[in-house]
Image (tube, grey):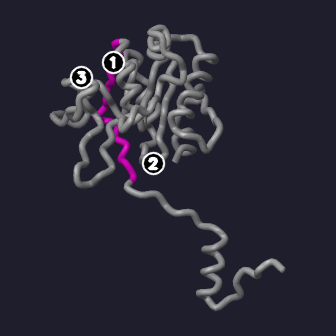
């Protein structure tokens, strides 16, 4: 899926490969630090893409295109099919008071100004990171797990603190996958061979 996205992005975009596997918040910290070292324009943009979502080929180009939006996200939905609420939220009672309010009154194609969008497909301009750093935070402070709160909420909170709202583009939808395929390995091959009455894997002597 990620290679498909790369084939549809503009030739001047750069794809980075960093250490993996690594916890998502640590990976993002490394990406942001590298991004800040290698860029200088306030409108330079770092795009985060989660691999458990079905992104459309045009997603990255569409997220980066509007220079006026400091944090621009796709529209996605909570994975639970019993409450598939949109990931476009406002914290009207304050960040420390749950639950957040999910913004539901929109027409497809609307761009919603909210406190928190979906980090599963998110474009962040360099000026946002600069503002957070100038507010006294370090790179390791950008995505932090706080008790039961996820790291995406924490980043949204920092953005709000420095005056950068999240803009959810309801015309760019990235559905949440409900499950991931299991790995196929040597044990599967051995079981198949035995099911079909063929000689399986020999034990090492």
Report how far apart the C-alphas of labels 2 and 3 lie in the structure: 30 Å
Q: Secondary structure at mark 2?
A: loop
Rendering quarter of residue 76: top left
* Left or right side of 89 for 184: right
User: Does residue 60 appear in this view?
Assistant: yes
Q: Secondary structure at mark 1?
A: helix
Q: Residue furthest front?
A: 147
**What residue does disc 2 label?**
52
Q: Position of residue 126 (x, y in %)?
A: 50, 16
**What residue does disc 3 label?**
94
What's the residue at 37%, 43% (across, down)?
Answer: 174
Q: Secondary structure at mark 3?
A: loop
Q: Nearer the viewer, residue 59 or 186?
A: 186
* Marks 2,1: beta carbons within 8 A: no
Q: Residues within 10 Å of mark 2 (few under 14, many from 20)?
A: some
What's the residue at 37%, 12% (across, down)?
Answer: 162
**What residue does disc 1 label?**
160
Labels 2 and 3: the sequence-earlier one: 2
């Amino acid at each position: 899926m990620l290679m498909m996205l790369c084939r549809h992005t503009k030739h001047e975009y750069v794809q980075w490969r960093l250490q993996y596997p690594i916890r998502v918040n640590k990976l993002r910290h490394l990406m942001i630090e590298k991004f800040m070292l290698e860029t200088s324009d306030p409108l330079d943009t770092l795009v985060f893409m989660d691999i458990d979502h079905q992104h459309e080929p045009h997603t990255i180009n569409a997220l980066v295109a509007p220079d006026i939006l400091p944090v621009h996200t796709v529209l996605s939905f909570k994975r639970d099919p019993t409450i598939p609420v949109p990931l476009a939220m406002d914290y009207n009672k304050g960040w420390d008071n749950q639950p957040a309010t999910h913004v539901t009154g929109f027409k497809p194609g609307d761009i919603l100004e909210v406190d928190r969008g979906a980090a599963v497909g998110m474009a962040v301009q360099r000026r946002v990171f600069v503002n957070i750093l100038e507010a006294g935070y370090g790179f390791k402070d950008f995505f932090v797990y706080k008790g039961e709160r996820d790291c995406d909420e924490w980043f949204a909170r920092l953005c709000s603190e420095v005056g950068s709202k999240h803009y959810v583009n309801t015309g760019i939808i990235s559905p949440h996958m409900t499950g991931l395929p299991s790995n196929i390995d040597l044990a599967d091959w051995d079981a198949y061979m035995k099911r079909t009455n063929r000689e399986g894997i020999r034990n090492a002597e």
